Amino acid sequence: DTAVSQTPKYLVTQMGNDKSIKCEQNLGHDTMYWYKQDSKKFLKIMFSYNNKELIINETVPNRFSPKSPDKAHLNLHINSLELGDSAVYFCASSQDLWVSGGTDTQYFGPGTRLTVL
Amino acid sequence: DAKTTQPNSMESNEEEPVHLPCNHSTISGTDYIHWYRQLPSQGPEYVIHGLTSNVNNRMASLAIAEDRKSSTLILHRATLRDAAVYYCILRGSSNTGKLIFGQGTTLQVKP
């Protein structure tokens, strides 16, 4: 069983389109994250949710809207896609960031490679 | 957030030990030292973490300097599958759970 899964694995789309990436974890974790890895392989946090509540929004453009329908899912919707949005997007989860005190470990999905043409 | 410094790249021969260094001179007393690695075309995966004492698990060992200003990730017998980017990350008890990735160390393992 895959612990953290993302769909789709690859996404190719035109500028200006709207797209969504889905993430699901079957680990029973309370906290989920989205990270972006750009073309220079630099990984950066975008959002985190704990128990469906937004905790971190790292100055991401409001074209990006995460949605957490339940604790096991954190989807990422992107409006009006731009060339600069091309990247690999990773979803991750951890048990509970508030309880961990810096010890929790994050489990990452396989990534979604988004290409905007 | 305290910063870490790692060499950009390292090479190792297969089946030999590898010592990956990390400097974190501004570490605070409550910061944990975490290591993650990212294999090619995969998401990052947790390797090990520690606070003050050295730690061992099935993947690696973590040696932490007495003053905690540096640490070393030790792979006891490198395999080709260990070729990856290794990230040393500090996690504070007060942070919001985010991992702050640096450029990491790209480890190349030669057969």
Image (tube, rainbow, N blue to C red):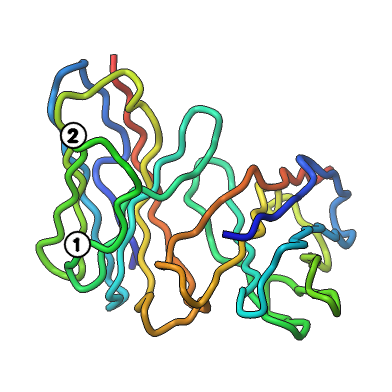
Q: Residue at horizontal 19%, vertical 62%? A: A73
Q: Is residue B2 left or right of residue A111?
A: right
Q: Is residue A3 above or below residue A114?
A: below
Q: Residue at horizontal 20%, vertical 16%? A: A14
Near-viewer residue (A17 or B81): A17
Image coordinates of residue B39 in percent, x first then y, are: 59, 48
Say few, some or many: other residues with alpha carbon within 10 Å of mark 1 (under 14 / 14 to 19 / 20 or more): many
Q: Is residue B18 above or below residue B9?
A: below
Q: Chain of mark 2?
A: A
Q: CA distance from mark 2 to mark 1?
A: 20 Å
Q: Chain of mark 1?
A: A
Image coordinates of residue A4 in percent, x first then y, are: 33, 61
- Between circles 2 and 1, the one closer to the viewer is 2
Q: Is residue A72 left or right of residue B6?
A: left
* Quarter occupied by residue B97: bottom left
Secondary structure at numbered mark 1: strand
User: What residue would you read off at disc 1?
Assistant: A73
User: What residue would you read off at disc 2?
Assistant: A63
Near-viewer residue (B66 or B59): B66
Q: Are marks 2 and 1 in contact (CB under 8 Å)?
A: no
Please identify the quadrant where the C terminus of chain B is shown: top right
Image coordinates of residue A86 in percent, x first then y, are: 35, 26
